[in-house]
Image (cartoon, rainbow, N blue to C red):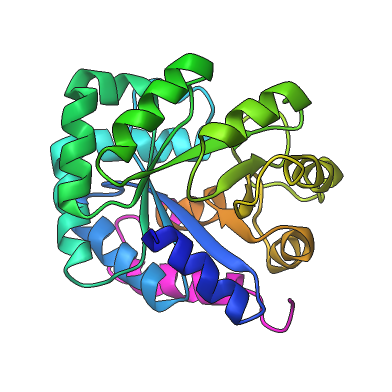
Amino acid sequence: MSNIAKAFEAIRSEHRGGFIPFISAGDPDPQVCLEILGILAKCGADIIELGVPFSDPMADGPTIQASSKRARESGTDLPTILEIVRVFRNRSDIPIVLFSYLNPLLAYGLSEIAADSADAGADAVLVTDAIDGEAARLADEFRKHNLDFISLIAPTTTDARLQTICSISSGFIYAVSRTGVTGARIESATAAEDLVRRARLYTDLPIAVGFGISTPEQICDVWRYADAAVVGSAIVAEIERSTGLKDLPARVENFVRNLVPKGCK
């Protein structure tokens, strides 16, 4: 059983929803990023998504675009990220998902990044812009090293493609709550609930919902119909607001503690 499967087993046994925070690796710099990972672990993260900074993050809104830019300007690259994962793994057993676009992985080398990610202690890889045969090839490569391959589905995904995507996925399915780019929203997304219902026809894997989840109320709503909620832009925005301040870690910790709801599911 993979570490991600164990995490969801624990979530189910505790009769609650899962909390999956996202941050950009190396934002605002590698050392502070490592400290933030520890804070997320302390604040109840079940799994952590660690974004690989990229120069053309087309699925991301301005908040995560800016975090990716800060990380790249701090010198963060894939070897730096793998070292962050390695150090964190020596401190915590919370699963880490590397969240990346395809180009950085191709530049590093697919077999090399699969082997080195596993060696560093990562548990899974999510590639935002790999589809169909290319995604299947990636899934096979990562599984050689016991890494789960997480796939994205969206409200616009057809049933035929849902079946294909679910068939090559492991760990969990990431359901995008809406069309468009990442970013905090105010309204709830009814399309996400329908997407989760459709996906469950083709997979027994846990399903996490993300993109625009930014309040305790929205997390509670997601827990009503899905296995976990992913929160990215809201946390990344707090990192941005706190960058350059001496109390950045304390501010992020306070924000995350207030974000995770109590008393629902």
Which residues fall within the magenta stretch? 240-265
Image quarter where the C terminus lies is bottom right
Q: Position of residue 43 (x, y in %)?
A: 45, 76
Q: Position of residue 140 (x, y in %)?
A: 36, 30
Q: Residue at x 22, y 43 (%)?
A: 117
Q: Is residue 82 visible?
A: yes
Depicted 250 relative to depicted 95: above or below: below
In the current view of this chain or complex, which residue is farthest to the top? Answer: 133
Q: Residue at x 43, y 17 (%)?
A: 134
Q: Nearer the viewer, residue 158 or 75?
A: 158
Q: Nearer the viewer, residue 202 or 38?
A: 202
Q: How many marks?
A: 0
Q: Position of residue 48 (x, y in %)?
A: 41, 58
Q: Nearer the viewer, residue 137 or 109?
A: 137
Q: Residue at x 65, y 51 (%)?
A: 204
Q: Residue at x 24, y 25 (%)?
A: 110
Residue 124 magenta-highlighted: no
Relative to 229, 237 lies left or right: left
Relative to 34, 196 lies left or right: right
Residue 255 magenta-highlighted: yes
Q: Is residue 73 visible?
A: no
Image quarter where the N terminus lies is bottom left
Depicted 224 relative to depicted 51: above or below: below
Q: Position of residue 148 (x, y in %)?
A: 40, 45
Relative to 88, 20 lies left or right: right
Relative to 57, 214 lies left or right: right
Depicted 3 relative to depicted 263: above or below: above
